């Protein structure tokens, strides 16, 4: 029996610990930063305060951007989810060769570099007058969210035995009702994660929003990006902490959902 | 017994349903992705006079464009290499440690993964600045004499990009490693192989597809990455994505921007097409 603490084992543990520290460091640093009183970036903060949280909640521009982002993300989820579910159902139902191509096309938004998507969409929007509109943002975000919805729902459908739906239909339900009554409840966990993915994809999307949002319809990501590029406003630390809190809640919610399933 | 024609009608109905269900999603991707991409492609070979290859010629002849492409490839390759080297041990730990520790390791990968890229850029700007925490710790411990320039240059770009890419390496790799049957490792050591031999001859080859999937994903995302290089590179390290953005938003030069986009897109899709022969693209993108 060899000892538990050999040199390679210690070296291995050290590397893993250092990489994990590297991964967690930014998340760990932002929260204390947001409670600092200083105007300049410093860590650890000398005096604690809530002033950057107030400056976020009292700023009309930030509040408006938050409202736009939440609205766009909600609309994107509402549109992308049923579309993605329908497409996943169709892809799961048959084994045509053509369908592999359809699936690849629907996954394309994940393959094409986002900067190319953004400039292409901007180019088209400029011609049809969709630049700086909520509609334009929702449409572009729906396209970007579709592959995530598709992947999540397909995973759910592959684990589901379609025979059950067949049984319901052979007992006289029409196909749509059989889907709603039998299939849908059983793939609910993957629907929840699909919805979460769609919502977060939109909320988090920056590059397309940089190109096509503006005026009264700027997203929070566009404002954050501009603020980070031009001059660093510590309000961002407060917003960042709130965003980290949101993603923690979502990760936990998603984790519990999958644990229940 | 249903007649042949009734069966055929049912089959046609089934096909029609499949098409109807796919239509909305295909329409959205067609109008908002394929149409803009074709438009860019047309724009890249078209000027006021008609057909032209001038923009592509400029990509090769103008050293800014060529250098930018080379820098982009170099940084992407470096970040991919670092992700494999640093990501492999973490994925291995997550796959082989007891449940509690594995969950902890995975949580520490997933939490930053779910944190907005902008938030992470902000944190790195704070951490890596001249009088930031990293420089304080390094000078305080006597490892270096004066503060290092860690941000607003290529170092900042690489650190920030690596941070975004590591989870894209670790998570698929973990997925593959987790499926490697424990029995094989037990069998190998019961036949007399030392732990290192078992790892090198059994575990490492079996985790190969995961390494390939993760590395391709990381390399390709790096090639078109915009946010972090823009914010942490301080305008010194120009990548293809930044070139496209400047051509479009500042100079309103659609020709060169389109040509650069088409080349970048061709490279990315080419990589996916090549790798598809080893690991299906759907797998790399996360379809099970």
Image (spheres, rainbow, N blue to C red):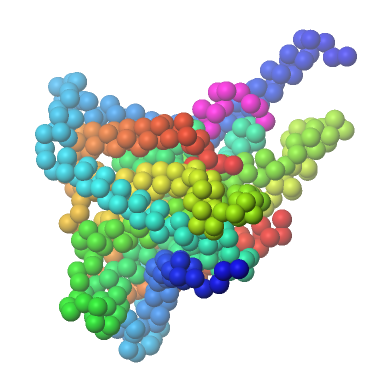
Q: Quadrant of residue A86?
A: top right
Drawn side of residue A201 relative to residue A183, left or right: left
Residue A128 or residue B109, whichever sits in front: B109
Give residue B36's position: percent from left, percent from top.
Answer: 35, 34
Judging depth in this view, the residue of B276 and A28 nearest the camera is: B276
- Name which residue lies at 32% across and 32% down: B266
In the orientation shown, which residue stands out farthest toward the front?
Answer: B192
> Which SS does the magenta portion mostly show?
helix
In the image, is residue A221 above or below residue A208? below
B197 vs A51: above or below: above
Residue B54 falls inside the magenta stretch = no
Q: Position of residue B66 (x, y in %)?
A: 17, 40
Res A249 seen here? no
Q: Residue at left 51%, top 53%?
A: B197
| Left or right: where B243 falls relative to B176 | left
* Quarter placement of the C terminus of chain A: bottom right
Q: Position of residue A135 (x, y in %)?
A: 44, 45
Magenta residue span: A93-103
* Farthest bottom residue in view: A47
Residue at image point 61% right, 32% down: A91
Q: Is residue A101 magenta?
A: yes
Residue B72 visible, this angle: yes
Residue B190 percent coordinates (x, y): 64, 54
């Amino acid at each position: 029996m060899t000892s538990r603490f050999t040199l390679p084992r210690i070296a291995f543990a050290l590397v893993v610990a250092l990489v994990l520290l590297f991964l967690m460091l930014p998340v760990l640093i932002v929260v204390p930063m947001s409670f600092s009183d200083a105007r300049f970036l410093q860590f650890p903060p000398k005096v604690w305060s809530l002033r950057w949280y107030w400056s976020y909640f009292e700023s009309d521009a930030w509040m408006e951007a938050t409202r736009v982002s939440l609205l766009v993300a909600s609309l994107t989820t509402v549109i992308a989810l049923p579309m993605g579910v329908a497409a996943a159902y169709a892809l799961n139902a048959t084994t045509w060769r053509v369908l592999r191509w359809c699936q690849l096309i629907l996954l394309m938004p994940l393959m094409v570099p986002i900067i190319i998507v953004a400039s292409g969409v901007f180019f088209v929007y400029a011609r049809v007058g969709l630049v700086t509109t909520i509609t334009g943002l929702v449409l572009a975000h729906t396209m970007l969210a579709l592959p995530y919805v598709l992947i999540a729902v397909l995973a759910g459908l592959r684990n589901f035995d379609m025979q059950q739906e067949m049984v319901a239909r052979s007992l006289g339900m029409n196909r749509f009702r059989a889907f709603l009554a039998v299939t849908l409840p059983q793939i609910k966990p993957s629907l929840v994660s699909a919805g979460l993915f769609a919502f977060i994809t939109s909320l988090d999307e920056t590059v397309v929003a940089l190109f096509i949002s503006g005026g009264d319809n700027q997203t929070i990501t566009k404002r954050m990006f501009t603020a980070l590029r031009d001059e660093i406003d510590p309000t961002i630390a407060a917003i960042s902490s709130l965003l980290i809190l949101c993603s923690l809640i979502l990760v936990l919610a998603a984790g519990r959902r999958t644990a229940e399933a | 017994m249903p007649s042949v024609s009734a069966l055929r009608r049912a089959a046609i109905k089934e096909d029609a349903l499949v098409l109807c269900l796919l239509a909305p999603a295909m329409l959205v991707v067609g109008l908002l992705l394929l149409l803009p991409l074709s438009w860019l492609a047309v724009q890249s070979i078209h000027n006021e006079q008609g057909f032209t290859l001038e923009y592509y010629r400029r990509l090769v002849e103008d050293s800014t464009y060529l250098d930018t492409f080379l820098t982009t490839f170099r940084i992407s390759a470096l970040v991919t290499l670092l992700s494999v080297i640093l990501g492999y041990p973490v994925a291995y730990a997550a796959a082989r440690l007891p449940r509690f520790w594995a969950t902890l390791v995975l949580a520490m990968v997933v939490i930053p993964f779910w944190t907005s890229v902008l938030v992470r850029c902000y944190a790195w700007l704070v951490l890596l600045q001249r009088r930031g925490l990293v420089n304080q710790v390094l000078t305080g411990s006597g490892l270096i004499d004066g503060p290092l320039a860690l941000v607003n240059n290529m170092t900042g770009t690489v650190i920030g990009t690596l941070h975004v890419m590591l989870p894209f390496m670790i998570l698929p790799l973990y997925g593959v490693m987790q499926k490697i049957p424990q029995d094989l490792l037990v069998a190998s050591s019961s036949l007399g192989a030392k732990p290192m031999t078992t790892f090198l001859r059994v575990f490492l080859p079996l985790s190969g597809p995961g390494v390939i999937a993760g590395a391709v994903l990381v390399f390709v995302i790096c090639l078109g990455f915009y946010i972090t290089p823009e914010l942490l590179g301080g305008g010194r390290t120009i990548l293809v994505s930044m070139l496209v953005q400047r051509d479009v938003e500042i100079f309103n030069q659609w020709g060169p921007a389109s040509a650069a986009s088409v080349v970048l897109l061709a490279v990315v899709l080419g990589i996916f097409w090549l790798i598809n022969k080893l690991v299906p693209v759907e797998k790399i993108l996360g379809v099970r």
